[in-house]
Amino acid sequence: MIYLALAGVLFVIGLHGLFLAGHPLRKILSLNVLSAAVFLLLVALAREADPLDAVPHAIVLTGIVVSVSATAVALVLLVRLSPPKRDSKEVTRKEGR
Amino acid sequence: MGGVVLVFDVLLAAALIWLAWQATHTPGLFRAVISFIIFGLLMALAWVRLEAPDIALAEAAIGAGATGALLLSALGRLAVTDEAGTPWQERADLTFWIPAGLALLGLLTLAAWYLPSPGLGQEVQASLPDSGVQNPVTAVLLNFRAFDTLLEIGVLLLATIAIWSLGPMPMPGAQAIISPVLPALGRILFPMFALVSIYLLWRGSHAPGGAFSAGAVIGAGGILSILAGARPWLTGSAYGPWRVLLSLGLSAMLAVALGVIVLGQPFFAYPTHLAGTIVLLLELAAGLSIAMSLVALYLAGQPPTHWDGESLRQ
Amino acid sequence: MSLNHWLGAVLVISGLPFFFLGTLGLLRFPDVYTRLHALAKSDNVALGFVCLGLAVYSGSLITGLKLLLIWLLMLVASAAGASLIGRTALARGIKPWGV
């Protein structure tokens, strides 16, 4: 039950971000949150079944790979469409690891 | 014991909601991306709690690992990272979008509510002996619903083609820090990545694991060694083995799907006595293609036909 | 509850203060270097205790070796990560606190 509610809340957050965020990267992140919410809904419903329903699990696995492909294409499009970076110092790429 | 588990679930849900909010609504793109990566890791925990270990493995490797690397490298290439010029769209159509979103959520909940509750678990269990494997998720992925997986591998290949058609890959700039740590890390860890992914692939037939997790792990290992300064051996050459590897999964699945027709079976219906072998071979092909595609997606463009000092200096 | 269960539980619980102190350091220390100092050391000790405790708790050699492998991999990852973050911070010209 907690996870069904969680899926609902994440869905609303993702949808709101998707429609209203200004920066395109935000929209991509929101789309990912949205898809996570849908996956969560599917699997949380699958757990109710006995024995465990394997079909939604397989669908979600497929969905994760499809969503990473979509994210990658969207990110590359975003980088190509945005104005080129002015300073040549590539420092920001090194942070966060 | 039940109380402790409930507290854990509530804490996990609260953390996920907070991270999702951070990723989509608080200022600072870098913070948003980091929050999203942590969100992916915690989602893997949520999958474990929902008794979906296959998804947890894939989410940890793809959702947090590969997507995180993609997001960070895209962020590093963006000129504007502070969102200064892109304000929130504070407009009057909030009065439209919020009710519309809530109505969509309500409809989805209603649809989910009316799903037949026992699901297909019993059918899967009943025909599991015919599938050639013991793990129900692998059986669904590569036997019962192999058609979905075929299309999914197709999407992955299509994404790679789309990215390659957008132009040559951006050349990595000079390394900001000269450190012996990162190359050493890549050298130590890549064999581990390979070992783990082979183990996952083999394990997939009887326990959580399989082509998706295996491909994702070795793909993540490839991305790590590129980060560590290894020259990616993925080339755009029309004659090299890489295009073959990228399309191996799709072509193997198509070959099997059409090949069984010759044996007198319907489309994509494996002969029962060969099912185990076929599933294992398909997993191997799909896993290799997934790994190659993830590295190709990370490179964000068509790699040069051969790597040398000339092309690196562009 | 047999002996190895109690011993395992004690070991896992004795790892928790290290996690707590590491997190406290992450939240309260003034700059990136001191935070790294707090995290990279105490979390490794804490994880070592937790893994050792779980290995004793399970009572099986194979599980124990797997947990040892997890701990070693975490040691490598944490050392490499801390070193990279520290070097990047230095390269960007962030002065250590109090220098």
Image (cartoon, coloured by chain):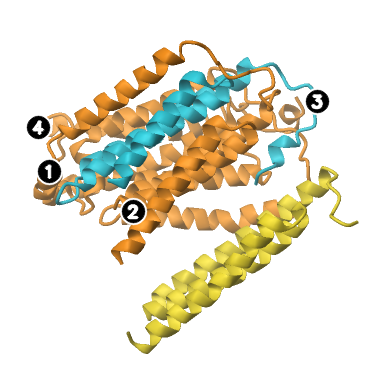
A17 up-or-down from C39: above or below: above
Front residue of B133/B99: it is B99
Identified by mark 4, the residue type is Gly
B184 up-or-down from B76: above or below: below
Which residue is under mark 3? A87
Which residue is under mark 4? B264
Chain identity for the colour yellow used in the image:
C
Sooner in the amino-acid sequence: mark 1 or mark 4:
1
Chain identity for the colour orange used in the image:
B
Which residue is under mark 1? B118
Labelled pair 3, 4 in contact (Cβ < 8 Å): no
Residue ID at (49%, 72%): C51
Which residue is under mark 2? B49
Front tag of 3 and 4: 3
Whether residue A58 is visible to the viewer of this picture, yes or no, is no
Labelled pair 4, 2 in contact (Cβ < 8 Å): no
* Badge 4: residue crowd in 10 Å (few <14, some 14–19, many ≥20): few
Chain identity for the colour cyan used in the image:
A
Task: Specify whether disc 1 shares its chain with disc 3.
Answer: no
Identified by mark 2, the residue type is Arg
Separation (CA) of disc 1 from disc 4:
34 Å
Residue ID at (25%, 46%): B137
